[in-house]
Image (cartoon, rainbow, N blue to C red):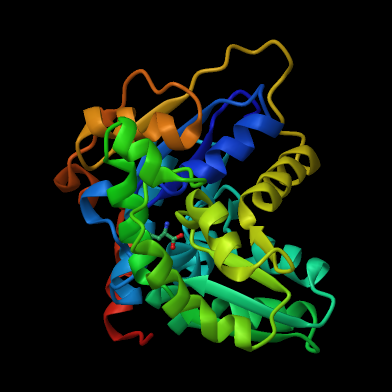
Amino acid sequence: MEQLPIGIFDSGLGGLTVASEIMSILPQESIVYFGDTARCPYGPRDLNEVRRFVLEIGAWLAARPVKLMVIACNTATAAGLALAQQAFDVPVIGVVLPGARAAVRSTVNKNVGVIATVGTVESGAYSRAVRGLDAGVTVFSAATPKFVDVVEAGLHRGHGALEDWLAESSDVFIRPSFHELARDYLDPLKRSGVDTLVLGCTHFPLLSAAIQGAMGSNVTLISSAAETASEVQYALKRRGHLAPEGQLVKHRFATTGDSVSFAKFGSRVLRHQIDTADHSPLDTLVELPSAELLTLIDGLGGASR
Ligand code: DGL
């Protein structure tokens, strides 16, 4: 079991921010990363549809096989973590609880802001997680879906003098108009007096410098990536499933979208060269779930958001 890789998935490239932290604290572990780029973004979709995607990709990872799964997407965690934990035989870790825990630890004035996709905000997952940890903390949530588009567009822009200038202090290329968008989204949170802001979407750490600039230096930004990586380490250690020292480390990447651009732009997010990514067509993905999983998926038809 300990020789098996860790499975990580997201709607696209954003989850590589989590993969990067896992690779940094667990350098002896191999990972299999699945980016569902062809169906990105998940944020505006019905949560039942996202639950189905979670089960399909979980089945794909379970078939590798993997020793633990990380849902490196807040929307997919909010929609499908509980279902995935029920469906698969390995531990499944999401990104919402680790982010909530870090926020509760950080806040002094007990006012925490969360920015996330529409799906994550509407699910109420962060409010529940934060209040479950400390009922005295007030959560102010804002859906900031255009930030996902900014990251996607910024990543797909090439290098050049103009792009470098536009990138300013961000990890991705952003246009000056971003600041206006950030003001519209973030001013209400600033007025609420939050001292801590959770980046409740795995795409957002790539905008953290610009978001910090808009919020001001007195607000602490929380990315759940580091906290999630620690949880993965703890879960593997507790089960005696950490990879043995000296094991050959091999990372694999797969995407439902264009594998060449995944490798190219993913390398930028991961800060680690992705030599190749495999293309996994959607039609093979939907054929994977077992009869038992299909029953769970069918059951989603009647469930509500
Ligand atoms: N990375 C996803 C998340 O953390 C957001 C992107 C999307 O909408 O698919 O929620």
Residue extending furthest toward the left: 283
> Foreground: 165 or 96?
165
Quadrant hosting residue 264: top left
Q: Position of residue 182 (x, y in %)?
A: 45, 70
Quadrant containing ligand 1: bottom left
Q: 261 or 153: nearer the eye?
A: 153
Q: Position of residue 62 (x, y in %)?
A: 44, 42
User: In the image, 32: left or right of 47?
Assistant: right
Query: What residue sits 47% from the left and 24% below the top?
Result: 251
What residue is at 30 percent from the left and 59 percent from the top?
149
Residue 31 seen from this side? yes
Total numbered labels placed on residues in the image: 0
Residue 233, percent from left and from top:
73, 40
Left or right, 300 with respect to 251, comes to left
Residue in front for this viewpoint, 61 or 100: 100
Q: Is residue 65 visible?
A: no
Left or right side of 257 for 1: right
| x 77%, y 77%: residue | 133
Name the quadrant of the N terminus.
top right
Image quadrant in which the C terminus is located: bottom left
Above or below for 244 versus 62: above
Q: Residue 162 appears at what percent x and percent y? A: 30, 38
Residue at position x 18%, y 47% from top? 282
